Image (cartoon, helix red, strand yellow):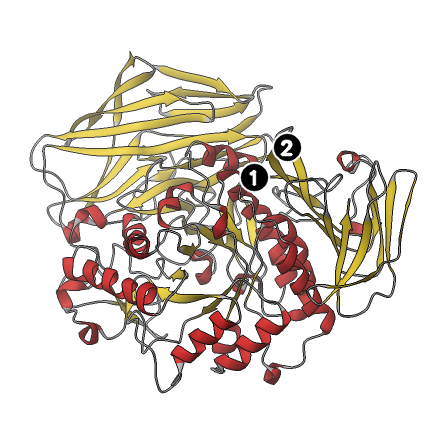
Amino acid sequence: MTWKHECGGFVFEWDLQRDEATVKATDGRLVWNGGLLPTLRIAGENGAPTIVRSQAVALEKEGAESRISLHFPGLGEGFLRIASTPAGISFPELRLKWNAAPAHLVSLFFGAATEEIPGWKRGEDGFWPTWRADGFCVPSAKGAPVQSFFRFWDLGQADLALGSFGPTGTPYAAAFPRPLYCGAMGGAAGWVVAGPGAIPDGALYLKIRSGAACLHLLYREDLWGAPQGAERIWEEPLRLSWAAEAWEAYRVHFSTFPVEPVAPLHQRSGWNSWAEYRMGIYENRPLIDAVARAVRPEMFTFDDGWETCNSTGRIRRERFPDFEGDLAAVREAGMAVGLWQSVAWVDQPEEVGLGAGDLLSGLDGAPVRTNWLGSPYQPSHLALDPSSASAREFIRRKTHTLVGTLGAKLLKMDFGYGVPGPDVAAPRDPAYRGERLAFALYRLMADAARELNPDITLQCWGLSPLLRPAFNLLTMDDLGDAGAQEGLGHRQWSVWAALAGAQGTAIMASGGYDWSQDAEIVLNTAVIGAPGSVLNLNPKAGAVPPEALARRRAVGLWYRRTVQWRPLWLNTEKGKLGAEPLARCWGRLEPSASGESLRALALRDGADKPSDLERAPLRGIDWSGRWALLAQGDGDIYSGEVACIPLDEGWLLLPSETAPRAVVAISGFDQESPAAWQWKDGFIRIDATHPPLDLTGYLIRR
């Protein structure tokens, strides 16, 4: 019984009787190997779990798919459907028909073996993970500094959360770019990405033990009860996708989940109050005035701290006695109002008419506490259970207040990932269990907001296309994971954020807290999408250099408003074992009548400047210093109007078949003055030597 599929320059072969699968490059080099038959951990009568590994009984062709008949010793019979895809393989369905009453499922594994290995004893898990490769790639699995690539021995004994449950490397890494719902293994010969094809009803982890791995779905139905019925059905429990590079393997994997592009109106610039709030500075009006005067973003978001406590939707009057006036000030300045919300947490449920039955509870029925760290030594919260009609109605009613009464045009939906896992609590309704819990909470808030405003912008994290029904603006977060290396961290995150470009997702590039590193962030933002910031503008935090404000003003004026694109990498590194992703020089290619047009460029100098060969797609563009180029409108940077933002002293050489009508220097938002430029031999040259500190940039008008 062997199943084989070849695509994308790789060969997948699976010996079902031995449960040994391999992915190899067509030249024979091994990329990945391991088992794929499902293994169950079942709660025994005495409370001790039993490991049951399925056995393949028969392989039959059924149309475009194949059916693998399975035997689960002591439990029942079932089958697994397998299908080939242009990206790899998929398991569209897994079924198990119980011999007797449904067993209580503790865990489901793909890639777990129970056989004895001579001379070795199984560890406390009771099985051997079997997925083996040179290393792992889970974007931003470690922080401070950000790290995504790991040799197979680097992680030791680790459970990497691929969804919403638990810390991953560093606690806050549960935000961008997660939930991913997949992880990668591979090396120099290629990479394989593995994950479910639908949001699963268990908590999803990549379990790594001594250099090998398996995919782990945690249920703990021994605590919360099993769904009734003669059969257990899993829809799309696993997909495997592969490519030569890890980034490309993720792109190919995500392409198997087709999504409609969001409306471009959600690609909007924003400013967030969190830099001040986290320092205990709650002076809204000076911040609003400073932001409007210096940058003029399209949205201003009041972050965590504006409510009486988490999730009430009620203004904290002792802190903000004239919050309505603050909202009015935002609108008068030409900005839309955004409001932060924790989708899961609630601190004082009795204040909003909720009781213990509306909250996630332990076995004793008492509500459990949680936080983003999963620690009892940090401030904690209670969590909503969407199983409760009262909890669902509370979310709807509160969201209507935010959108209808307070007039929010953006909701920053946070902390779907700061919820207790199945070992601690679970929704009462099995339909909301596992990774479906966070998605349900996001979706409840999103749907309630859209009832009043179909065009509301819903901001969240997570690169997986499976999340797209719940939000329309992907944010890159505030670089807390990068520690003191915000500029470097953003250069890594930007490479991963580019995966969302092909999905037609609006992206807010966000930023950090350190003005001295913000130039690197602005440069990447020019390619990625809308600028967003949590930078501090309060004078108590120190004076902001005028050139730093000018850069933020420039990218806010001229960023691309479109939402579908793919990267032109140039010499940007997409990452591999031993080398993290690093945005160097790269661009933004957007669909056009002629196919694709280059409409944005981030250009770095020195060691980050491409070789002549790497620069070949740029038609002779040359430069010194760092520059961001942004086409305005539907033209490309070679023929249409172009905004040129210098981040240092330097010069720019840009090809142009004809002389431009004008090249002007812009100060402030619209103050024009002559620029130092010339057109010669088919190139426009702009000199930004000793530019004014408040120079916004240059506009080339053709």
Residue occupying image coordinates x 47% and y 60%? 170
Q: Element type at marker 1?
A: helix
Which one is nearer the viewer's eye here, 146 or 416?
416
Residue 437 lies, with reference to residue 482, above or below; the image says: above
Which one is nearer the viewer's eye here, 261 or 154?
261
State the image coordinates of residue 504 (x, y, percent, origin top left).
Answer: 49, 41
Could you tell me the amino acid type at mark 2?
Answer: Glu
Residue at the left extreme, as displayed: 100
Residue density around tag 1, few if under 14, some if 14–19, many if 20 or more, within 10 Å: many
Quarter holding the N terminus?
top left
State the image coordinates of residue 338 (x, y, percent, origin top left).
Answer: 43, 65
State the image coordinates of residue 676 (x, y, percent, origin top left).
Answer: 88, 57
Q: Is residue 551 visible?
A: yes
Residue at the right extreme, as displayed: 680
State the image coordinates of residue 606 (x, y, percent, origin top left).
Answer: 82, 52
Quarter holding the C terminus?
top right
Residue at the front extreme, as displayed: 661
Residue occupying image coordinates x 22% and y 67%? 368
Left or right of 512: which side holds 613? right
Q: Quadrant of residue 619?
A: top right
Mark 2 = which residue?
596
Could you tell me the amino acid type at mark 1?
Answer: Trp
Mark 1 = which residue?
247
